[in-house]
Image (spheres, helix red, strand yellow):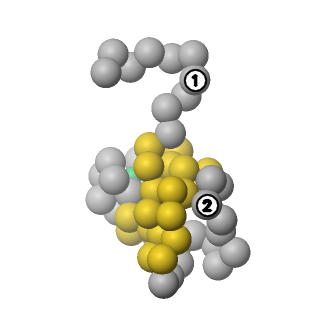
Amino acid sequence: MKVKCPECGAEFDAPDDVIVGEIVSCPDCGLELEVSSIQSGKVDVKIVRISGEDWGE
Ligand SMILES: [Zn+2]
């Protein structure tokens, strides 16, 4: 299961039993990523915003 970090572009392996909604962290930049979909061995993730913190978006 390959995951591509949307922040730094690094590819890393997620556990084979990873599920949608699970949090994985990028080994490269340390960002926390939530699994948003899994399709034929490819895992899409979105960046987790820590609640309570305002990033000014
Ligand atoms: Zn990263």
Give the residue drawn at x 62%, y 53%.
Answer: 21
Q: Is residue 49 left or right of residue 56?
A: right
Give the residue drawn at x 46%, y 56%.
Answer: 45
Can you tell which mark lies on residue 38?
none
> Compared to 11, does 52 lie above or below?
above
Give whichever of 12, 6 is nearer the camera.
Answer: 6
Label 1 Cα neighbours within 10 Å, binned few <14 / some 14-19 / many ≥20: few
Give, as a three-letter code, the residue at label 1: Ser
| Residue of label 1 | 51
Point out the frontmost of discs 1 and 2: 2
Give the residue drawn at x 57%, y 23%.
Answer: 51
Q: Is residue 17 left or right of residue 36?
A: right
Residue 42 image position (x, y, % from top left)? 45, 76
| Residue of label 2 | 20
Disc 2 element:
loop
> Compared to 56, does 25 lie above or below?
below
Residue 52 image position (x, y, % from top left)? 57, 16
